[in-house]
Image (cartoon, rainbow, N blue to C red):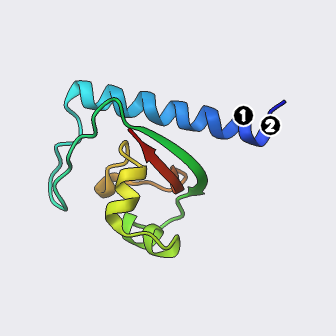
Amino acid sequence: MATPRADHRAVVAAVLLVVAAAAAAAGVGAGTGGAARVPLPLAVRVHCTGLHVVRPGETCASVARAAGLTVGQFTLLNPNVTCAAMFHGQWVCVRGSAIG
């Protein structure tokens, strides 16, 4: 039987996938400023094994750096996150893999 923690991670991963798919279908993510965003194919799944809750003043770059990731790796793990609009309390993936 899966532990409650493992079940929680599965739910978070599923929510991330649904949000990413809805954003891709709606054309959301073609951003203003920053790096160009390349939409992931819907067949790509993110398997998140580590979460982080964004604190005031944090950016994609600072969260990525603290987790030992490049910004590119961070955005691959978080296709639903718009770096220019990241907010306090937002959950982001800082460890895992993109499967596709």
Q: Residue at 53% x, 43% y: name it.
A: 47
Q: At which x and y percent is residue 25?
A: 25, 24
Q: How many marks?
A: 2
Q: Is residue 57 visible?
A: no
Q: Residues within 10 Å of mark 1 (few under 14, many from 20)?
A: few
Determine whether, in the image, residue 67 is placed left or right of residue 84: right
Q: Residues within 10 Å of mark 2 (few under 14, many from 20)?
A: few
Determine whether, in the image, residue 55 is placed left or right of residue 40: right
Q: At which x and y percent is residue 9?
A: 65, 40
In this rendered view, identify the residue nearer to me: 92 or 1.
1
Q: Is residue 91 above or below residue 55?
A: above
Instruction: State which quadrant residue 2 falls in.
Output: top right
Q: Residue at 32% x, 50% y: name it.
A: 82
Residue holding disc 1 = 7
Which type of secondary structure does the marked residue at label 1 adopt?
A: helix
Which type of secondary structure does the marked residue at label 2 adopt?
A: helix
Q: Are marks 2 and 1 in contact (CB under 8 Å)?
A: yes
Q: Residue at 43% x, 46% y: name it.
A: 98
Determine whether, in the image, residue 69 is placed left or right of residue 53: left
Residue holding disc 2 = 4
Q: Amino acid at mark 2?
A: Pro
Q: Residue furthest front?
A: 100
Disc 2 to disc 1, C-alpha distance: 5 Å
Q: Amino acid at mark 1?
A: Asp
